[in-house]
């Protein structure tokens, strides 16, 4: 039984990779979780997961020179599939092979989190959103960020990808967010899973190269991610149906 979530946003830097790793660890307390760095052009998961030195990554799998299993690392209670950072690795990778990677990994896990690129930029950038069952939209509490998030939802919906929830990150004004969140929710299919403050612990975790829940498990940001994990209802879906959805997903000719 598996459900695949794309952790997505409109523009870059909203906290997708941070969220993928933190939420992944929180979900791993109850589920078998696999994280895939589907941001194959600007991969970052490896820096958040202590995997900067590994040789085999998603790039090699997408280039056809390694099997999926060779690129899976057990870290922080999850299976993590990092992606390389070289331009040549990106050039040699065939993005459409991600379908088969997700279909293969779906056979042995409960939850797949696809750390996604800033979306709607290119054909390969939208692939994780097309493949996922539902999105987790990471937003900053600003009008441009909300507007971008709504556009991503709109795009995803045309491919049958729903929204599991929204997550506000880098919040600096706790009072204002109480006002903004319910208003924003009206525009999204999913509820607010959690609100994560601008946090020194998050920055420290990034510098240390480990996920927030390992670096500062007692921080309020970590608690906010645990709250998001418990607010997320994971749908049990039949592996064959899901694998079929992944392998047959159509990649658009244009966005
Ligand atoms: N709640 C937070 N408090 C402080 N810093 C944060 C917070 N969330 C993210 N950051 C910092 O913001 C930067 C961007 O975060 P992250 O890499 O997770 O974003 P992203 O959406 O994945 O970016 P990209 O679109 O480039 O992939 C990182 O340096 C991260 O440490
Ligand atoms: Mg990222």
Image (cartoon, rainbow, N blue to C red):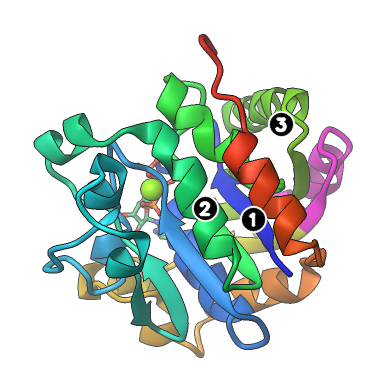
Q: Dots 2 and 1: beta carbons under 8 Å?
A: yes
- Using residue 167 as the reference point, say whether residue 255 is left or right of it: left
- Number of residues whose C-alpha sits closer than 10 Å to that of mark 1, classed few (under 14), some (14–19) or many (20 or more): many
Which of the two marks, 2 or 3, is nearer to us in this view? 2
In percent of width and height, residue 189 lies at 85, 40
- Number of residues whose C-alpha sits closer than 10 Å to that of mark 2, classed few (under 14), some (14–19) or many (20 or more): many
Q: Mark 2 — residue?
A: 102
- Number of residues whose C-alpha sits closer than 10 Å to that of mark 3, classed few (under 14), some (14–19) or many (20 or more): many
Q: Mark 3 — residue?
A: 153
- On screen, 209 above or below 58? below
- In magenta, the rendered stretch is 175-192
First in sequence, mark 2 or 3: give its number.
2
Which of the two marks, 2 or 1, is nearer to us in this view? 2
Q: Splitting the image into 4 quarters, where does residue 194 fall?
A: bottom right
Residue 198 part of the magenta-drawn span: no
Q: Mark 1 — residue?
A: 4
First in sequence, mark 3 or 1: give its number.
1
In percent of width and height, residue 150 lies at 71, 28
- On screen, 219 above or below 199? below
**Residue visible at 39% across and 69% down in the picture:** 80
- On screen, 75 above or below 15? below
Whether residue 166 is visible here, answered yes or no, is no
- Using residue 50 as the reference point, say whether residue 11 is left or right of it: right
First in sequence, mark 2 or 1: give its number.
1
- Using residue 88 as the reference point, say whether residue 47 is left or right of it: right
**Residue visible at 44% across and 30% down in the picture:** 125
Main SS type for the magenta part?
helix
Q: Nearer the viewer, residue 124 or 11?
A: 124
In percent of width and height, residue 162 lies at 78, 41
């Amino acid at each position: 039984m598996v459900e695949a979530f794309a952790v997505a946003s409109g523009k870059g830097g909203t906290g997708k990779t941070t969220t993928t790793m933190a939420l992944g660890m929180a979900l791993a307390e109850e589920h078998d979780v696999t994280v895939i760095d589907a941001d194959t052009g600007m991969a970052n998961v490896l820096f958040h997961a202590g995997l900067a030195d590994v040789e085999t990554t998603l790039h090699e799998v997408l280039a056809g020179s390694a099997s999926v299993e060779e690129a899976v690392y057990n870290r922080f209670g999850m299976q993590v599939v990092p992606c390389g950072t070289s331009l040549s690795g990106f050039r040699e990778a065939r993005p459409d092979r991600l379908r088969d990677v997700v279909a293969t990994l779906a056979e042995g896990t409960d939850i797949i989190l696809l750390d996604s690129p800033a979306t709607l930029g290119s054909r390969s950038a939208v692939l994780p959103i097309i493949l996922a069952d539902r999105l987790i939209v990471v937003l900053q509490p600003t009008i441009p960020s909300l507007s971008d998030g709504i556009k991503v939802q709109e795009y995803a919906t045309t491919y049958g990808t729903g929204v599991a929830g929204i997550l506000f990150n880098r919040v600096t004004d706790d009072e204002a967010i109480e006002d903004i969140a319910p208003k924003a929710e009206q525009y999204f299919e999913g509820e607010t899973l959690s609100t994560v403050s601008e946090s020194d612990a998050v920055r420290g975790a990034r510098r240390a190269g480990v996920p927030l829940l390992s670096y500062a498990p007692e921080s309020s940001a970590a608690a906010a991610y645990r709250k998001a994990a418990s607010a997320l209802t994971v749908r049990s879906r039949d592996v064959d149906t899901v694998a079929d959805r992944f392998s047959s997903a159509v990649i658009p000719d244009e966005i």
